[in-house]
């Protein structure tokens, strides 16, 4: 059996190496083309949505102008038709009507020249405008932009505001000294403004297309945080670590070092994490979990007391009012566990995660807004 497992691992390792070699030999433009195909539908959709208000306004103007000028032309045509059908036109000398403009020009040359000159000016201006429409549109857009827009277009920075990171610190965590190693690590939420400088404008466009992958890779990083709040030396170390890790991730998909540098700014919370925390906690007692034992027919159980930290007080109020239903939900939905789980630290983490998941599902089923932030095991006893 062990031989088959080792053989399977060896085959998997060989396949992974072959895939890595294949990725290395594949040109970068192939990956860029695949990324373009992936994001093309959303890009087209965004472009269409951004132009929809403008298109709607242009459509309304188009319809309005057509109706307006159609009405004017219709009125002019109706007046001409009425004149042609009138007795005055029938009795009038047609030759005199055709020669009337020439006679007017002969007896009023100044007015005729003024009208002709005005018509030539308008016709020439219309011809010039028509020939230089593109230049006029480009210049108008440039005049409407703010003075700093040109600099903003030329920069190579992408900024992710208020990005959350999960970090682990030993002992108290906030500003600990350089003494002995702590006995236990605690998790904290660190919020950072991440300003990423791309190598060039082309790489900036690539990073913008890969923003989802960038977010996922940032969240997966285990930052080398020494203390909170961050000190300048530790912040510089984290920035260098981020640049190296993200460039390595992009290298695996055939893109060489798109990130030039990263600048971080810590966003400090106005309130401590323990603000009014006691009002968002409750204790649940006497929850029994079945033990999975193959070599005995007796019923074995583990009794657990734990505390719940919720995201808001409404969750705690609801759980206190429906504690019996909550216990019944946990007892019927948590599967039997193996005996090693309550003993080992990793096993207790699995139990806590399962409890948190089931309580969140209980809240969601009852349409209660909020979630469980943390589970603290207070008591464990096997029977």
Image: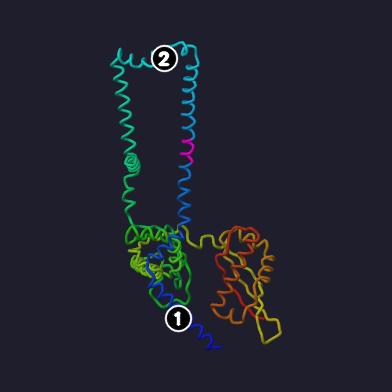
| Residue 376 lies in quadrant | bottom right
Vertical placement of residue 83 versus 184, above or below: above
Q: Is residue 225 visible?
A: no
Percent from the top left, x then y, of residue 332?
68, 71
The part of the chain drawn in magenta is 56-62
Was residue 61 drawn as part of the magenta stretch in this picture? yes
The residue to which callout 1 is attached is 14
Q: Quadrant of the C terminus?
A: bottom right
Q: Decide if residue 137 is on the left or right side of residue 304.
A: left
Vertical placement of residue 228 versus 83, above or below: below
Q: Residue at x 38, y 73 (%)?
A: 25
Mark 2, secondary structure of its residue: helix
| Residue 206 lies in quadrant | bottom left
Q: Is residue 41 visible?
A: yes
Percent from the top left, x then y, of residue 276?
54, 60
- Foreground of the two, 264 or 270: 264
> Is there a contact, CB below 8 Å, between mark 2 and mark 1?
no
Was residue 57 drawn as part of the magenta stretch in this picture? yes
Vertical placement of residue 190 versus 76, above or below: below
Mark 1, secondary structure of its residue: helix
Q: Main secondary structure of the magenta part?
A: helix
The residue to which callout 2 is attached is 94
Instruction: Report, in whole angstroms, how far the alpha carbon at label 2 lies from the one at label 1.
Output: 100 Å
Q: How is the image coloured?
A: rainbow
The local crowd at label 1, few if under 14, some if 14 to 19, many if 20 or more residues have their Cα within 10 Å, is few
Q: Residue at x 62, y 67 (%)?
A: 358
Percent from the top left, x then y, of residue 378?
59, 73
């Amino acid at each position: 059996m062990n031989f088959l497992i080792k053989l399977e691992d060896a085959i998997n390792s060989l396949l992974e190496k072959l895939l890595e070699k294949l990725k290395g030999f594949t040109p970068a433009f192939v990956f860029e083309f695949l990324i373009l195909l992936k994001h093309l539908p959303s890009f087209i959709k965004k472009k269409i949505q951004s132009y929809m208000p403008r298109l709607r306004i242009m459509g309304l103007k188009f319809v309005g102008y057509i109706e307006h000028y159609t009405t004017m032309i219709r009125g002019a045509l109706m007046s001409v038709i009425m004149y042609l059908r009138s007795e005055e036109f029938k009795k009038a000398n047609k030759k005199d009507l055709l020669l009337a403009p020439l006679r007017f020009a002969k007896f009023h040359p100044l007015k005729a020249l003024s009208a002709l000159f005005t018509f030539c000016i308008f016709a020439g201006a219309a011809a010039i405008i028509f020939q230089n429409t593109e230049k006029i549109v480009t210049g108008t857009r440039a005049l409407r932009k703010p003075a700093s827009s040109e600099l903003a277009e030329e920069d190579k920075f992408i900024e992710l505001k208020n990005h959350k990171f999960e970090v682990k610190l030993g002992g108290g965590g906030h500003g600990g000294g350089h003494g002995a190693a702590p006995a236990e690590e605690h998790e904290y939420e660190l919020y950072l403004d991440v300003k990423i400088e791309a190598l060039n404008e082309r790489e900036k466009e690539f990073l913008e297309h890969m923003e989802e992958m960038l977010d996922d890779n940032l969240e997966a990083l285990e930052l080398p945080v020494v203390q909170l709040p961050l000190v300048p030396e530790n912040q510089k170390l984290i920035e260098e670590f981020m640049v190296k890790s993200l460039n390595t991730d992009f290298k695996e998909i055939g893109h060489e070092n798109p990130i030039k540098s990263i600048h971080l700014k810590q966003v400090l919370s106005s309130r401590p994490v323990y603000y009014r925390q006691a009002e968002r906690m409750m204790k649940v007692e006497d929850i029994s979990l079945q033990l999975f034992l193959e070599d005995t027919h007796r019923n074995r159980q583990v009794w657990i007391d734990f505390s719940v930290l919720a995201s808001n007080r409404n969750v705690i109020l609801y759980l206190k009012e429906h504690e019996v239903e909550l216990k019944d939900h946990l007892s019927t939905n948590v599967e039997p566990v193996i005996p090693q789980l309550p003993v080992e630290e990793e096993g207790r983490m699995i139990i806590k995660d399962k409890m948190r998941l089931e309580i969140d599902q209980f809240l969601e089923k009852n349409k209660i807004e909020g979630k469980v932030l943390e589970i603290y095991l207070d008591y464990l006893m096997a029977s």
